[in-house]
Image (tube, rainbow, N blue to C red):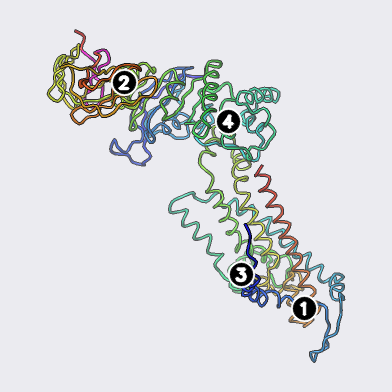
């Protein structure tokens, strides 16, 4: 187990990257604390897998360093890093039995046979495959194969980190929950540093202590699920996390006043004068409908009842705005204004969050 | 559902029956016909029964040709299959060099058999051949027209030169279809190069490899043209393989009866081996299916 430090790291798949766009992974500095469970969240193609493969040593970065506990491993091959990684699609050794598959990483490291036998039994119990241990792996279904892959990833106890690259893609939904829960309990039990790549926010938020959100080759925010929800550092985090995502409205801001398409609202905190593309970001949870003449005038398009609450889809001067109304809250036709809870208002300049000035 | 009975439909398969009859059944039947009869010329035939078959089974000449044939096929399989896999493993995976390798590898496969024979016949000659002359200049005694060992080596090297590409190309195609994740997982699991080959690559190319072995066995078992052009079956008859001996008997000595009986047995052996291969291959698939 180790603390992983990424120092000035960047990677390009091109031999001679010149522009910033050439980099699949843009320069980043990041510390992964020892023993924490992280989720690496982002849309497909944002560089998640690249980052993971650099940590495991399958890829060598174009620039920067990787440190395991202050020990430089940038150029060290995968075998020397003692990392476990599970891939998106199942990888099993076809000609081996399930038992041999699970024992393979241990045997390659010359572990004691008695220990291997006991450990394999333990892992088999964890993934629920004790009864199929002596069957050939090639004959199994895709999700059984993926369980073997997961098991092979977990079989070594002394790994520096456990990396998962969207491992539950091919697994049945009910099994997903079960396996994810097992991964979590495994984490509690052994305290491995875990990095779990996914594009599914539910998966990320339920699995991880901390979520790292990536966008376009950049790490835009690392934080607890609560931080991501309350203070997204980047507009991408705002609309990627949450269902529906954060409302983003173009605004002009001076001091503690914001002007949105001619309507002035008070922010309750000062931001000075901002330049660039300035946006107001408010989650639907902090937005509510009212009648009267306070707030922004909107047109309600439709109301979706999702059981626990209602999602109001509205339109403000051509920009869609979502409002979450509590179950049972009255929505009447004369409600044509929205107001924001000042606690939930964030200000963004050129997509990055601006912290309010302390008065 | 009731099917309508229409016996006239049989006429629809008539073209195929006629075609197969003329291209396969009737020629084979003439061979069968010869194999059970004897003649003293004048187109007069006498019933011989299974006599020729008995004679052939007891014939020392045939058994020694059969023995040489088996030894030859086994040697070229033992060289070409591992060598082909080795070449495939070391070929570039993509890019310009991969394409170039593929083209170069397929060149020998495009050369007609008798041309291959002629190339090696000249290449190995001590007086004008590059190989033969060079070996002679180095003081190595090499003469495929006189030395049995030299003749065998020449015939085997020629076959390896001609056909290893086929094995390599098939194995290469099999290797190309292995997803990257397998190699990455092997690195993570700290498998060494041998284990990667043994547990990832070999199982994944097993299917194409079986086809390669079958093709190479069949082809080498029926080999005729190349050794005929190079050594003519000699010196003596040390490189007289089954087909060469058969042609000698049928056309050289005009012993049509024994040659026909022998052809049929030859055919049955090949059929048997193919059947065994087929069974083994389908059993491999079945084992996968459960």
Count of residue discs:
4
Please state which of residues A282 and B152 is positioned toward the viewer in this rendering: A282
| Residue visible at 54% across and 49% down in the picture | B90
Mark 4 crowd level (few <14, some 14–19, many ≥20, 10 Å Cα): many
Tag 2 and tag 4, C-beta contact below 8 Å: no
Mark 1 crowd level (few <14, some 14–19, many ≥20, 10 Å Cα): some
| Residue visible at 46% across and 56% down in the picture | B99
- Horizontal side of B290 relative to A275 (left or right) equals right
Chain on which label 1 sits: B
- Horizontal side of B132 relative to A319 (left or right) equals right
From the image, state whether disc 4 or disc 3 is nearer to you: 4
Please give the residue where the numbered disc 4 appears in the rendered image. A147
Please give the residue where the numbered disc 3 appears in the rendered image. B120
Q: Report helix, strand or loop for mark 4.
A: helix
From the image, state whether disc 3 or disc 1 is nearer to you: 1
Judge if badges 1 and 2 mark residues of a common chain.
no
Q: Where residue B53 sits: x, y (%)?
A: 84, 73
Please give the residue where the numbered disc 1 appears in the rendered image. B249
Please state which of residues A149 and A132 is positioned toward the viewer in this rendering: A132
From the image, state whether disc 2 or disc 4 is nearer to you: 2
Please give the residue where the numbered disc 2 appears in the rendered image. A324
């Amino acid at each position: 187990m180790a603390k992983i430090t990424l120092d000035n790291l960047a990677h390009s798949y091109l031999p001679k990257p010149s522009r910033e766009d050439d980099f699949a992974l843009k320069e980043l500095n990041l510390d992964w604390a020892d023993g924490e469970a992280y989720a690496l969240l982002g849309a497909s193609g944002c560089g998640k897998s690249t980052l993971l493969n650099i940590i495991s040593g399958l890829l060598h970065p174009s620039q920067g360093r990787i440190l395991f506990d202050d020990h430089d491993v940038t150029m060290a091959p995968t075998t020397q890093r003692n990392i476990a990684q599970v891939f998106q699609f199942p990888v099993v050794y076809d000609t081996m039995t399930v038992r041999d598959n699970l024992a393979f990483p241990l045997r390659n490291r010359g572990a004691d046979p008695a220990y291997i036998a006991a450990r394999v039994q333990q892992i088999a119990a964890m993934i629920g495959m004790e009864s199929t241990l002596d069957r050939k792996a090639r004959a199994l279904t895709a999700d059984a194969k993926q369980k073997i892959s997961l098991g092979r990833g977990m079989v070594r106890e002394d790994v520096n980190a456990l990396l998962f690259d969207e491992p539950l893609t091919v697994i049945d939904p009910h099994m997903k929950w079960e396996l994810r829960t097992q991964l979590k309990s495994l984490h509690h039990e052994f305290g491995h540093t875990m990095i779990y790549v996914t594009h599914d926010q539910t998966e990320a938020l339920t699995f991880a202590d901390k979520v790292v959100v990536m966008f376009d080759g950049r790490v835009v925010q690392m934080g607890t699920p609560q931080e991501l929800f309350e203070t997204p550092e980047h507009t991408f985090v705002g609309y990627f996390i949450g269902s529906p995502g954060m409302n983003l409205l173009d605004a002009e801001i001076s001091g503690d006043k914001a002007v949105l398409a001619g309507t002035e609202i008070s922010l309750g905190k000062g931001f000075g004068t901002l330049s660039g593309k300035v946006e107001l970001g408010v989650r639907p949870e902090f937005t509510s409908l009212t009648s009267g003449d306070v707030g922004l005038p909107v047109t309600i398009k439709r109301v979706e009842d999702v059981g626990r609450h209602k999602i109001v889809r509205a339109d403000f001067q051509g920009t869609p705005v979502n409002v979450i109304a509590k179950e049972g809250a009255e929505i009447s036709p004369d409600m044509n204004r929205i107001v924001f809870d000042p606690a939930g208002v964030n200000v963004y300049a050129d997509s990055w969050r601006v912290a309010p000035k302390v008065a | 559902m009731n099917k309508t009975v229409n016996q006239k439909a049989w006429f629809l398969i008539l073209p195929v029956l006629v075609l197969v009859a003329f291209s396969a059944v009737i020629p084979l039947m003439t061979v069968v016909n010869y194999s059970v009869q004897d003649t003293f010329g004048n187109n007069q035939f006498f019933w011989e029964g299974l006599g020729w078959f008995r004679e052939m089974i007891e014939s020392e000449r045939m058994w020694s040709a059969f023995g040489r044939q088996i030894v030859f096929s086994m040697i070229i399989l033992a060289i070409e299959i591992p060598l082909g896999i080795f070449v495939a493993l070391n070929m570039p995976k993509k890019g310009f060099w991969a394409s170039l390798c593929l083209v170069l590898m397929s060149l020998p496969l495009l050369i007609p058999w008798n041309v291959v024979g002629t190339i090696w016949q000249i290449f190995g000659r001590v007086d004008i051949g590059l190989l033969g002359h060079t070996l002679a200049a180095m003081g190595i005694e090499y003469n495929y027209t006189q030395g049995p060992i030299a003749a065998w080596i020449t015939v085997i090297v020629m076959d390896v030169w001609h056909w290893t590409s086929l094995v390599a190309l098939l194995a290469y195609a099999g290797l190309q279809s292995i997803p990257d994740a397998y190699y990455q997982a092997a690195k993570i699991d700290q498998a060494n190069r041998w284990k990667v080959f043994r547990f990832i690559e070999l199982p994944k190319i097993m299917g194409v490899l079986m086809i390669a072995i079958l093709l190479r066995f069949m082809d080498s078992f029926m080999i005729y043209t190349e050794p005929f052009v190079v050594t003519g079956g000699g010196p003596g008859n040390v490189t007289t393989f089954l087909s060469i001996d058969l042609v000698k008997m049928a056309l050289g000595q005009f012993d049509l009866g024994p040659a026909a009986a022998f052809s049929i047995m030859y055919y049955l052996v090949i059929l048997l081996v193919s059947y065994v291969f087929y069974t083994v291959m389908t059993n491999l698939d079945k084992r996968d299916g459960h």
